[in-house]
Image (cartoon, rainbow, N blue to C red):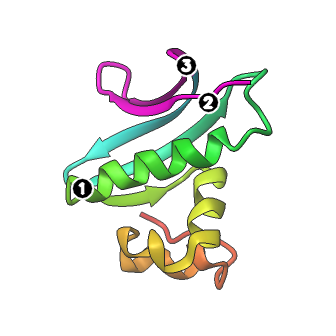
Amino acid sequence: MGAVTTQVADNTAESRYEITVDGKVAGYVAYRRSGDRVALIHTEVFGGYEGQGIGGKLASGALDDIRAAGLSVAPVCPFITRFIRKRGDEYLPLVPEEYRAWVRGDDERPPRG
């Protein structure tokens, strides 16, 4: 089997980051942007692509793009929250201070507001 090519791109028309595998859309992270904050609200990897690390590549690609744009992240999606938690200091600085304890797992509920 040959090498698989993946690419993450911001589809601004659909308000989502999409990952393609060999040119075919394999999943997405839907978002809502407000000012300098991006709320990542839902992640989906399509059947046939699950269990191959596509979700992690999608999450890191979206978070890397958000970091490069100088924006912050409100991780509403449970998958993204767990991904940031597992990566520790790599992506936690993107999360506003008021959400960090929750993302780390120190608090049971996210802050209101």
Earlier sequence position, callout 1 versus callout 3: 3
Residue 3: mark in rendering: 2
Spatial CA distance of label 2 from label 3 is: 9 Å
Whichever of labels 2 and 1 marks the residue nearer the N terminus, that label is 2
Report if residue 13 lies within the magenta region: yes
**Residue 68 bears which disc, if any?**
1
The local secondary structure at tag 2 comes to: loop
Q: Position of residue 55 (x, y in %)?
A: 64, 42
Q: Position of residue 111 (x, y in %)?
A: 51, 71
Total numbered badges shown on the rendered structure: 3
Q: Quadrant of the C terminus?
A: bottom left
Q: Which residues, given as a range, are shown in magenta? A: 1-25
Q: Quadrant of residue 91?
A: bottom left
Residue named by callout 3: 22
Tell me if residue 53 is in the magenta stretch. Answer: no
Amino acid type, mark 1:
Ala
Residue 44 as seen in the image, left or right of residue 90: right
Separation of residues labelled 2 and 1 (CA atoms):
27 Å
Front residue of 4/82: it is 4
Residue at 50% across, 15% down: 23
